Amino acid sequence: MAFLGCIADDFTGATDLANNLVREGMRCVQVIGVPTLETVVGPNANADIAQADAIVVALKSRTTPVAEAVAESRAALAVLQQAGCQRFFFKYCSTFDSTPEGNIGPVAEALLDDLQADFAIAAPAFPVTGRIVEDGILWVNGVPLNESGMQHHPLTPMTDANLVRWLGAQSQSEVGLIDAHTIDDGVEAVRERAADLQSIDVRLAIVDTLNADHLDTLGQAFADAALITGGSGIALGLPAAYEQHGDIQRRPNAGQLEAFGGHCAIVSGSCSTQTQAQVAAFAAEHPALALDPLALANDFDQAVDAALEWALPKLAAGPVLVYSTDAPEAVAAAQAQLGNAQAGELVESALARISQGLVDAGVRRLMVAGGETSGAVVSALGVDWLRIGPQIDPGVPWTSTQISRLSDNESPVALALALKSGNFGDTDFFTRATWSSS
């Protein structure tokens, strides 16, 4: 029976969280969408899920209307509670992707209400990937969040790096801060500060996090908390704390997967600065095809078929990349002609259809860049669950699953998937990752 139940607001974020839990010794399975109780517990439960220490429910609620995000998150919590989970985690992006209206604050408060809990931390920082919080300000690779490129995000433009202020705008209750000096003073000092905040009716508190030691301290301080909210970084400090409290036993081989052969391919819908660099690095040495949103709008089926006709003959010679990744000005130009929502939906649908065609042609190692794109691809492939395997780069593991894609008459096939958040991975990520599971 899983001890930790997690709810993530997008697909790559869920994988990112699961990756860190696995690295610290918790066997972890990610399920796609709100599962039924029969899926996670009982005689007909999935065997990988039944043996997991942690279950991560991957939602697509980061950019949905607030009421919808709250309802879906509460439904996931109810299933995880019925499945026997004792601690709960609400995962969002380390760049706090949201708007002044939500969804982080409203979802966190709803989960606190359902758990009958009074307080939770908000811990987005992930120092090893360059995200730190100091005095409540989120820094990304040494620059404030609102100057990091995230201010240009088409759906959740982050225009304020002060997370106390940003979360406060979303929340009904007061938002506080547990600062770095308090965390440096140790576990008891952190607990005392949390108690002081609760005494003045603060329900959510941003926590400063400058380094891995802070993650460990926060893990110990809040190991008995009903709910933790944050990015995946804080998960690095939790398994050891849970083991010390006697709640779990960590496993040295938690991320072991079988080897995968077959063709390898990449689809990328992220337009983050980091993914732009990764696409450029891969395209300099390997076959790569850029999709044109306007061509998709003009004749969707023809554009998708043309992409597959280009890609399939090349698979035998090595990995191929199909992408819509582009600079902000190019994305803005397409959005101006097509509309923000239609441009995004066209690209996601195209990459999902292309992924189906690639898998039908024998691709057994598929990388997907971008949270929204990952959601579209796993839905199109009929993926219900993912077992989390070894890390490629911080925040991005290989995963394995079974899918029925080839025909109704064939048995399910094993597929390795790597779902990459747009901002994660070194510049050479695609080149290195294509061979890492072969």
Image: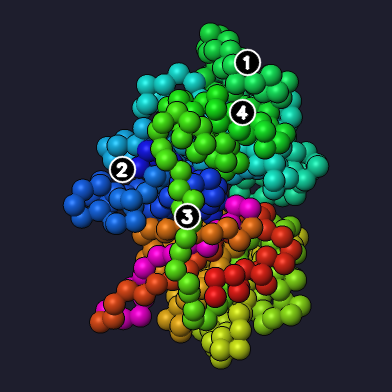
Residue 303's disc is none
User: What secondary structure is found at the residue carrying circle 2?
Assistant: loop
Q: Which mark is residue 189?
A: 1
| Residue 165 visible in the picture | no
Q: Which of marks 4 and 3 is in front?
A: 3
Name the residue located 55 percent from the left edge and 31 percent from the top edge. 219
107 up-or-down from 30: above or below: above
Q: Position of residue 259 (x, y in %)?
A: 48, 72
The residue identified by callout 4 is 217
Q: Measure the alpha-carbon separation of dots 1 and 3.
A: 35 Å
| Residue type marked 3 | Asn
Q: Is the residue 195 above or below the residue 239 in the image?
A: above
Query: Which residue is located at x 67 percent, y 23 percent?
Result: 183
- Range of magenta residues: 394-408
Identify the residue position indicated by label 3 in the image: 253
Residue furthest out toward the top: 199
Q: How far apart are marks 2 and 3 (CA)?
A: 18 Å
Query: Considering the image in quadrants, where does the C terminus appear?
Result: bottom right
Viewer-side residue, 421 vs 233: 233
Alpha carbon separation for disc pair 1 and 2: 33 Å
Asked whether 402 falls inside the magenta stretch, the response is yes
Amino acid type for the residue under numbered disc 2: Met
Q: Is residue 226 magenta?
A: no
